[in-house]
Amino acid sequence: MPSGEGSRPPSGVLMVLASAITFGTIPILGKFAYSTGMTPLQTLTFRFLIAAAGLLVVCVATRPGPNGVSTARAVRVLLVGLVFYAGAAGSFFGALTSLPASLASLIAYLYPTLVAMAGWAALGDRFSRRVAAALVVSFGGLALLVGGVDLRGGLPLVLAFASPVLYAGYILVSERLTRGISPVLSSALIHTGAAISFSFALLAFGPRELPPSVEAWALVAAIALLPSMLGISLLLAGIVRIGATRAAILSTFEPVVTIVLATSLLGDRLSPVQVVGAGMVLVAVILTQWRRPEPVPPLQP
C-alpha cells in the first residue's frame, strides 16, 4: 500500500484497537490490586496521583495549545474530574469488589445509550430510529446480563449501574467545556481533579497507608500508565487518522478484551443467556455511534 493518506486508516485502526486493549485491562488490574490487600480508595487514589503527575509532565514538555485557556475555565474542567469522573471511577471500582469483571465492564457500556437518551431529552438532539433501536437492544441486553446475577449483592450492582450514569454526565458536561482545549491538557486537568477527590476521601475514610507491597505498587502504576497515559495517547493519535466516530465504534473492542482476560485469568463465566445479552449491548453501542458526529471519545473509568 502506498504511503501517505492511504496508509493512515490501518495505522489509526491499530492505534485505537491498542487503546481499547489497554482500557480493557482496567477491571482485571483492579481485581489483582484488591488481591494484594488494596482497597478501592487506595487503588484509585494512587492511580490518579500517578496518572495526573505523568500527564502534567507531558503537558509541560509538549506545551499543548491553545494557550488562551483561562484559569476559571481550567478550574471548571478540574471540577468535572473531581465530581463526575471520580464518581464514575469510584462506582465502577466499588462494583468490582463483588461483581465479576466481565459483567461490570459490560454494564459500564450502557453509557453511550444514556448519552443518546440525554441528548434527546435535554439537549434537543434528533431521536432517530437508529437510536430508538439502540435503546431497546441495549436495555434488553442488560436485562439478560443482570438476570444471571445474584441480586442479594445489591450495593455492587447499584454501583455498577451508577458508573455509566455518572460517566454519561461527565461526557455531557465536558463536551462543551473542553472544546478548544488540548485533549492532553483537559485529560491532565480531569485526572488531577479525580486525584484531589480521592485523596481527600482516603484521608477521611482510610486506610491512610501506602500500597502494602511491590506487587501492589506495580499494579497501581500499571493502571495509571496503561489506560490513563498510554491508552489515551494511542486513542488521540488514532482519532487524528480515522476520526472520532470510527474510533468510538472500534472502542467497543474494550469489553471484549475484558471478557477474554476475565475468563482466562479470573475464571469469570457468562451463561449462554448472558453471552447473548453481552452481544446486544455491543450492538447497541455501535448503533448509537454509527455515522453520528461525536466529540473525541472521553476518558475511561
Image (cartoon, rainbow, N blue to C red):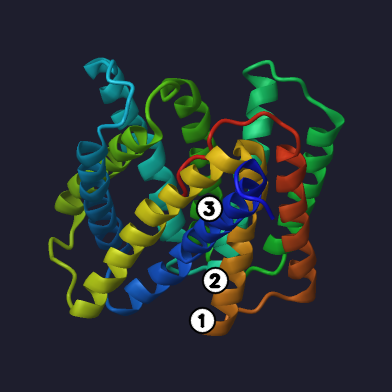
Q: Secondary structure at mark 3?
A: helix
Give the side of residue 142 with respect to residue 26, left or right.
right
Q: Residue at x 25, y 79 (%)?
A: 215
**What residue is drawn where x is 32% and y is 25%?**
65
First reached walking from the N terminus: tag 3 or tag 1: 3
**Crowd class of label 3 (few under 14; some 14 to 19; many from 20; radius 10 Å):** some
| Residue 279 at x, y percent in the picture | 76, 61
Quarter holding residue 78 = top left
Q: Is residue 153 above or below residue 163?
A: below
Q: Is residue 51 visible to us here? A: yes
Q: Which image quarter: residue 146?
A: bottom right
The amino acid type found where label 3 is placed reads Val
Query: Is 108 placed left or right of 67 in the picture?
Result: right
| Residue furthest out toward the front | 2
Is 9 or 264 nearer to us in this picture? 9
Q: What residue is disc 1 on?
A: 266
Q: Which residue is mark 3?
A: 158
Residue 295, by quadrant, is top right
Contact? badges 1 and 2 (CB < 8 Å): yes
Q: Residue at x 28, y 79 (%)?
A: 36
- Comparing 274 with 257, the one in front is 257
185 vs 109, nearest the viewer: 185
Q: Identify whether 70 is placed above or below 133.
A: above
